[in-house]
Image (spheres, helix red, strand yellow):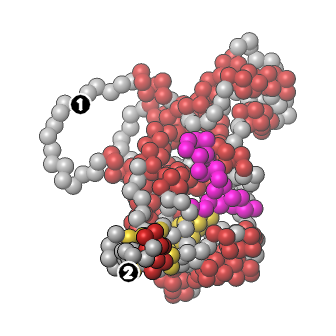
Amino acid sequence: METFASDAQKTPKPAEGKLADNIVYFARTLRKAGMKVGPAQVNDAIEAVLAAGIGTRHDFYWILYSVLVTRHEDTVVFDEAFRLYWRSRDLVEKMLQMFSRKAADRSEKEKKRAAESRVADALFEGQKNRNQPEEPPQVEFDARMSFSGQEVLREKDFAQMTAAELAQAKKALSELRLPHDEVKTRRYKPSGRKLRVDPRRTMRYAMRTGGDLIIPQFREPRVVHPPLVVLADISGSMSQYSRVFLHFLHALTEHRRHVHTFLFGTRLTNITRQMRYRDIDAAIDDSARAVEDWSGGTRIGETLATFNRQWSRRVLSQGAIVLLITDGLERDEVDGLEHEMDRVHRSCRRLIWLNPLLRFEGFQAKAKGVRAMLPHVDEFRPVHSLETISDLCLALGTGTSSNRLKTPMDWLRELDRAA
């Protein structure tokens, strides 16, 4: 790997092939970590570095970023790969931890950052393949109190999954048992059960025989899935969770008609049409291209006002259920946020707030945005793992929330008692 010169000095021209080889291997690492990096981009990156030169580490970062990163959601992966690969301060310590033997650390380990596991697996994949451990002898043991790999994957945070685990999680989301929530409408459909006579159909059939033969026809209320409206936050702190949740919404869209998906950061974008594509990769890629503010800031109050003004009358009908996916960290003032949340709550049958910050045990509803939104939601749920999404499906199907979850008002009471 190439080292960097000080900010004031220019690095002399590297030996032929050294820097190019490092950039090629770095691009290969990005590709294994899940980014779409082709040979043409690698060649452009090498030419860009040779043309611009390497003055500082900051300049070198933005030269590679401008060529290799084409999607907003790849920024986290690129940052972590650049930090590990291009000789950051803690690279030596990380390599020593990976390749040296040491006593087991009983202290609480620092939680990995987002995308760190995927990049580390891609970077050190060759080393892991060369050092294949010997097969341990088979030992029989009592596994009644142990957990399988599938159970561990169900409880693992999406942001801490490796690339392989994330692929398994996406596959599991597509095979998840979807909610069977149906509601009766005021319209009727023909029925073979003799519950209620349908006078109109009975007279229409009698006219075929001139009224000589009247055979009663029956009807029953039509049962349909209620509309499901999803408002997903794709700001910098939420983009990873929203992107994984889109896989679940794609599977849901294939099995029911009225699923409306909206993404918001600083503006509101309707991606309902994109989510109807059969190919999930094409659906998410097209959705990412339609969104101009992916991994940007957050304006929850302003985007909810846009939704209430332009879309609520179209999609919030027939007992619609609204899923709001956001951390509640409002960027602007919260004066209008409470009014817009109350308007959404009054326009739908159930308003469920999915917040990934609930994965932390010490979470408290101290933020102004969270306190303004909590009084106007029916349920307050986490959305950071396969288990939490499975619980959401169960809650949607039964129409009731779990007893182990605290209600939104419980969160506010705890905050008031602490104050």
Q: Residues within 10 Å of mark 2 (few under 14, many from 20)?
A: some
Q: As drawn, is 43 to the left or to the right of 232?
A: right
Q: As drawn, is 102 to the left or to the right of 286?
A: left
Cα separation, mark 2 vs mark 1, equals 69 Å
| Mark seen at residue 136 | 1
| Mark seen at residue 80 | none
Q: Is residue 325 visible?
A: no
106 in relation to 354, above or below: above
Name the secondary structure under disc 2.
Answer: strand
Comparing marks 2 and 1, which lies closer to the viewer? Answer: 2
Q: As drawn, is 369 to the left or to the right of 109?
A: right
Q: Nearer the viewer, residue 267 or 332?
A: 267
316 in relation to 357, above or below: below
Residue drawn where x is 59% and y is 66% of the image = 229
Return the x and y of residue 331 as percentages of the image width and height.
Answer: 73, 68
Quadrant where the N terminus is found in the figure: top right
Q: As drawn, is 185 to the left or to the right of 373?
A: left
Return the x and y of residue 410 as percentages of the image width and height.
Answer: 48, 83
The three-letter amino acid code for the residue at tag 2 is: Arg
Magenta region includes residue 144: no
- The range drawn in magenta is 259-284
The three-letter amino acid code for the residue at tag 1 is: Pro
Quadrant where the C terminus is found in the figure: bottom right
Magenta region includes residue 269: yes
Residue drawn where x is 69% and y is 42% of the image = 71
372 in relation to 60, above or below: below
Q: Is residue 164 visible?
A: yes
Q: Nearer the viewer, residue 154 or 185?
A: 185
Residue drawn where x is 74% and y is 29% of the image = 4
Displayed quadrant of residue 286 = top right
Name the secondary structure under disc 1.
Answer: loop
